[in-house]
Amino acid sequence: MKKVELLSPAGNLEKLKIAIDFGADAVYGGVSHFSLRIRSGKEFDLESFKEGIDYAHERGRKVYVTINGFPFNSQLKLLKEHIAIMASLKPDAFIVATPGVLKLAHQIAPNIPLHLSTQANVMNILDAQVYYDMGARRIIAAREISLKDLKQIKAELPDLEIEVFVHGSMCFAYSGRCLISTLQSGRVPNRGSCANDCRFPYEMYAANPETGTLFKLVEDEGIGTYIMNSKDLNLASHIKEILDAGCIDSLKIEGRTKAPYYAAITAKVYRRAINDYYEGKSNPDSYQKELNTMQNRGFTDAYLINRPFEKHDTQNLDYSMMMGTHQVSGIVDESGEYFECKYKTFPNDTMELVFPEGNLLEPIDNEIGKIWEENGEWHISFKQLLAENGKVWDQVHSGNLNRFRVPCALPHFTFFRIPATEDMGTVTKC
């Protein structure tokens, strides 16, 4: 039986490795301004992106290259060169958004499968057929589509793979068709530089053009001023419904610009949910508990299960981001021997360990610290904070760039976390 693919974001090399280690079957990312996430594209160069592809392939995983921007005429020569260079790295697919780029990529790199970006807004059989005839082997469905419509597309085009978003940021506009950022800051969303202007608080005014009078509209307390701010998509509790539909080939997590901890937790939770499905189990409460450890804008199950007109909980009018239930305080480096502080660490603090499933730990108690299991969770506490250079610190904060020894080798990219408190304020993003 072919199992559904779990597809995670890869904003840089570290996040690519984390997503794979925490359970992703495939990752997506890109290099340069032809990706719809310029900021994350700048975090990769050709050498590190090739390293990421090799890392994935060595572990039997896949990498899809994002070439899903909307190019100007002046960029077409550079685009052709970019497609050829990306093809030489031997990725597993290109993600493209326009008919022209789809055709061009097929001409330049005929052996690279083509996936159609959600920016193409495929909502029906007719459009899916057109892109399939042009060479698209997979469509990344618009977020506004329903499972019912996807089942109909699959029935008509059984060889066309279908990918759907199951977690991450939602756009206020229809599948990314927004000009607010362009108008206010000149940053064009469909060329990868959206400034997320919909996340800002706004004041509203009423103007009389005849008299030039301007009135501020004062909102009642509790109504909110984040009038365009969408909640985050979260379908972890609906995996059974989605997979029972029998038409979905890939579950996609949004978030190339999100933190490493986000890459880890989303991959871990959705990997667990998918595995549970195939084992005939489900534990939605545990999925949601873990997802709520991350920063979020509130969660919604959006439109895949329900029609848009049936949903009235997709907007968060009160805030643009809230802290999760936990704060990341450290991350173990790739050697497994040291950790980097991401918040603050004191001797004798107790921190929870979060590591990829399938790794086995043994309790230990030595001069560096202690690692133990309690109520199904692993914890760590340091007796001394010993830096790599041999210096012992009485406390460590996120600005300290030293690496500190752990009591024993841990799975690389293991996170340390502590319960969040209101007085943490703005903390280091991890």
Image (tube, rainbow, N blue to C red):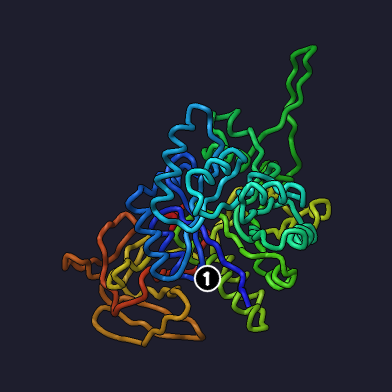
Q: Is residue 238 left or right of residue 257?
A: right
Q: Nearer the viewer, residue 382 or 315?
A: 315
Q: Is residue 388 left or right of residue 417?
A: left
Residue 424 visible (yes or no): no
Q: Which x, y percent locates residue 180?
A: 63, 33
Q: Residue at x 56, y 34 (%)?
A: 188
Residue type at numbered disc 1: Lys
The residue at the point 46 percent across, 49 percent down is: 30
Q: Nearer the viewer, residue 350 or 415?
A: 415
Q: Residues within 10 Å of mark 1 (few under 14, many from 20)?
A: many
Q: Is residue 405 left or right of residue 204?
A: left
Picture coordinates of residue 219, whole percent (x, y): 74, 39
Q: Measured from the top left, where is residue 377 in percent x and y?
A: 48, 81
Give above or below for 163 relative to 103.
below
Image quadrant where residue 204 sits: top right
Q: Is residue 421 visible?
A: yes
Q: Residue at label 1?
A: 268
Work out which residue is located at the far right of the displayed protein and give it: 310
Residue pictured at 69% horizontal, 42% vertical: 173
Identify the residue at the far left of this view: 390
Kindly indicate the quadrant of the structure image that contains residue 160: bottom right
